[in-house]
Structure formats: C-alpha cells, structure tokens
Amino acid sequence: MTTKITRIFLVTVMLLLSYSSRLDAEDDLASRQRKQVDAILAPWSRADSPGATVEVVQDAQIVLHRGYGMADLEQGSPNRPETVFSLASMSKQFTAAAIALLVEQGKLHMEDNVRNIVPELPDYGDVVTIDNLIHHTSGLRDYLTLWAISGRSLTDSMPEDEILELICRQKALNHRPGAEYLYSNTDYQLL
C-alpha cells in the first residue's frame, strides 16, 4: 500500500512541477512580450512626449496594461492604464458598423424613427431616421457647438445625460431630414 501511495505522490509532484515550469515559461513569454512593447513605445514614454495607453490581450488574458508618456503635456499628467481618451470622430466608423450589424440582425431598420428609440427627442414635425443619423442628414444641431455656446469648455467632462438634455432642448432642426448633408456629432452621439 505504501508503494502505491508513494507512486501517486511522485506522479502528483511531477505533474505539479511540470505545470509550474509551464507557468514559469508562460511568465517568461509574457515578460518578454512586455519588454518588446516597452521597447517599441520607449520613444514616447517620456515626460515631454505625448504617449498612449496599451492593453495586450492574449488567449483572453490581459498580459500588458500600461500607460506610456503623457496624457496632458500642459498639466504634466502621465498616461495610466485607466486614462480615458476622447476618440471623437475616429469612433464613428465603429458605431456605424455596430448599427449595420443590428440592421442585419433585424433589431433595427434604417427607416426607424429615432424618437421610437430616444423618446426624449422633441417632435420636429418630420421623422428623423437611423439612416439620417448615419449619413449626417438629420438636421439635428451639433451638440459640441451647443455645448460651447452654453459657455462650457470642450475639455470639460460631458456626462451623457447632460448631452442628451442639451440635444432635447433644441426645438427645431437646421434643415428637414434628408434634405441636406451637415456634419453633426449629435447624430453619432444618438447612435
């Protein structure tokens, strides 16, 4: 009996050592990858340089999440893993793609009245559709312009509820939906 227990114990120890060395190898790999990313971003990882926040995910595990360089040179604020960046118009293409997927799945239709989804919007007398929002033909006033006119800075925090309230206070459109193209951040904020 003792021999059998000894063998089970030895096999268990060997499996644990094997697993442990595999974890060490994975740690070494992750460590090497972190060093590679650090080396790539070294030119921007200074107190006098704008930088970035980077997250590397491998096999559904975060292997790197760091800030490099500065988030704000004037304020001397470094980038941190939790730094939030305003992607502004760079995100519009992804928003449009997400809407296209919802249309493809039948969850939205390009002709849908936006007021059916955002009932807080006033009745402008004309239907503003998803299609109008995607193509900047809604006639809705640009919320960033409205924000600035209201005396606030574009660098201020912009809570979504305040933005929606500002949009909904507009009782008229710049033009009838579909009649003109007029770039409007409001369209994509609503999307």
Image (tube, rainbow, N blue to C red):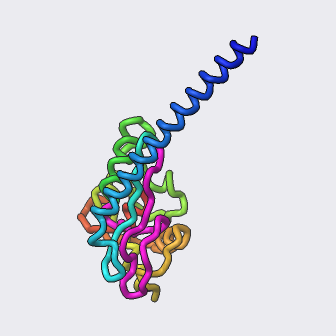
- Would residue 18 be found to the left or right of residue 52 on screen? right
Please state which of residues 119 and 20 is positioned toward the viewer in this rendering. 20
Please provide the residue range marked out in magenta: 61-90
Residue 53, position as x, y percentages in the image = 39, 65
Residue 166, position as x, y percentages in the image = 49, 74
Residue 70, placed above or below residue 191? below
* 51 is within the stretch colored magenta: no
Please state which of residues 185 and 122 is positioned toward the viewer in this rendering. 185
Residue 63, placed above or below residue 137? above
- Would residue 64 be found to the left or right of residue 175 on screen? right
Which residue is pictured at 32% across the width and 76% down the height? 50
Which residue is pictured at 45% across the width and 68% down the height? 84
> Number of numbered discs present?
0
* 84 is within the stretch colored magenta: yes
Please state which of residues 183 and 97 is positioned toward the viewer in this rendering. 97
Q: Quadrant of the N terminus?
A: top right
Which residue is pictured at 32% across the width and 68% down the height? 184
Which residue reaches farthest top?
A: 1
Which residue reaches farthest front?
A: 3
Which residue is pictured at 45% across the width and 74% down the height? 170
- Would residue 148 be found to the left or right of residue 122 on screen? left
Residue 136, position as x, y percentages in the image = 29, 62
Image quarter for residue 151? bottom left
Please state which of residues 151 and 169 is positioned toward the viewer in this rendering. 151
Q: Quadrant of the C terminus?
A: bottom left
Residue 59, placed above or below residue 164? above
- Would residue 135 be found to the left or right of residue 77 on screen? left
